[in-house]
Amino acid sequence: MHQHERHGLIAALLQKQGTIGIQDLMARLDASRATVRRDLQEMEAAGLLRRVRGGAQALGARPTHLTEPPFDYNVTLNRETKRAIARRAVDLCSERDSIIIDGGTTTFAMTEFLVQTKVEVLTNSLPIADYLMRHGENRVTLPGGEIFREQQLVLSPFDNDLTHRFFASKLFMGAQALTQHGLMQSDPLLIRAEQKLIDQAEKLVVLVDSSKFDGRGSLILCPLSRIDIVVTDDGISAPAAGLLRDAGVELITVPRWRNRSAA
């Protein structure tokens, strides 16, 4: 994980929790104690947090309800690779399809290409709904629920929301991680909302860049056997690709974006 990614995650965790310990950060960042201490020193010098004994404290940040990093932060990561994955995912849609798009930055990248289609979309993502409304002619439905500003999601804790009245040929979804255990997330509220979406789709299409196969999550959203297709970049390792094949998951890869000017 690069330095700016670690700093973004530390900031997101402090927004949610208020304080966090060094041991917890070492586990979440998969970093050494020295690296975590250096990150906290740099962020304190920049006025982003206050170091306390054994960890760090937020500077008056208002807590959020979800453990996921903010949408505005995530959307800046691996932007071109996400765009290539999203373009290929849209190729899986047929004219007049009814699809569900779960909120996330890789799925958000689909909007650029979806405006050229005539699909009906249910999404819990405010940025996805807004983009499609302003740029295309797709019919867009939002489920009812509470708005989570940092992640720009609409989530409902109730079982009888609009989701149960919408059936889709495909659900497009990202993930915190994809492991031998299945699709992983870290927030119980997200798990509850996303399981409802999975129940309403014939096929589950997962959009993840290859780094997500090295990630970790604390909660299993669904097993690999429930996933029909994974769209990722060609940086996926041979063991990860074999894991998907053994589970009967169709694997689609796209070229990973590389900054050739930096070579």
Image (cartoon, rainbow, N blue to C red):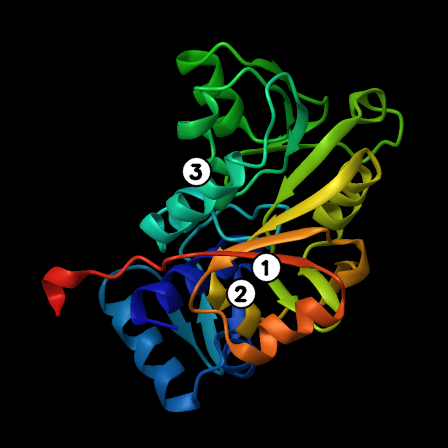
Alpha carbons under labels 2 and 1: distance apart: 7 Å
Give coordinates of residue 92: x percent, y percent: 58, 36
Q: Secondary structure at mark 1?
A: loop
Cβ–Cβ under 8 Å for marks 2 and 1: yes
Count of labels shown? Answer: 3
What is the crowding at mark 2: few (fewer than 14 residues within 10 Å), some, or many (at least 20)?
Answer: some
Disc ID at residue 212: 2
Give the position of the N terminus as an image quadrant: bottom left
The answer to which of marks 2 and 1 sits earlier in the sequence is: 1
Which residue is located at x 73 percent, y 64 percent?
182
In this image, 250 relative to 156: left or right? left
**Label 2: element kind:** helix
Where does the C terminus fall, quadrant-wise?
A: bottom left
Give the class, few, some or many, for how many residues have Cα within 10 Å of label 3's Cα (few <14, many ≥20).
Answer: many
Asked whether 174 or 37 is in front, the reply is: 174
Which residue bears the numbered disc 1?
A: 176
Q: Residues within 10 Å of mark 1 (few under 14, many from 20)?
A: some
- Three-letter amino acid code of the residue under disc 1: Gln
Report the residue at 51% width, 60% height from top. 13
- Residue 255 visible: yes
Q: As shown in the figure, which amino acid type bears the numbered disc 2?
A: Lys
Q: Is residue 202 left or right of residue 42?
A: right
Picture coordinates of residue 244, whole percent (x, y): 67, 67
Residue 208 in view here: no
Q: As drawn, which residue projects farthest toward the right?
A: 160
Location of residue 35 with respect to 244 vertically, above or below: below
Label 3: which residue? Answer: 109
Question: Between disc 3 and disc 1, whose residue precedes?
Answer: 3
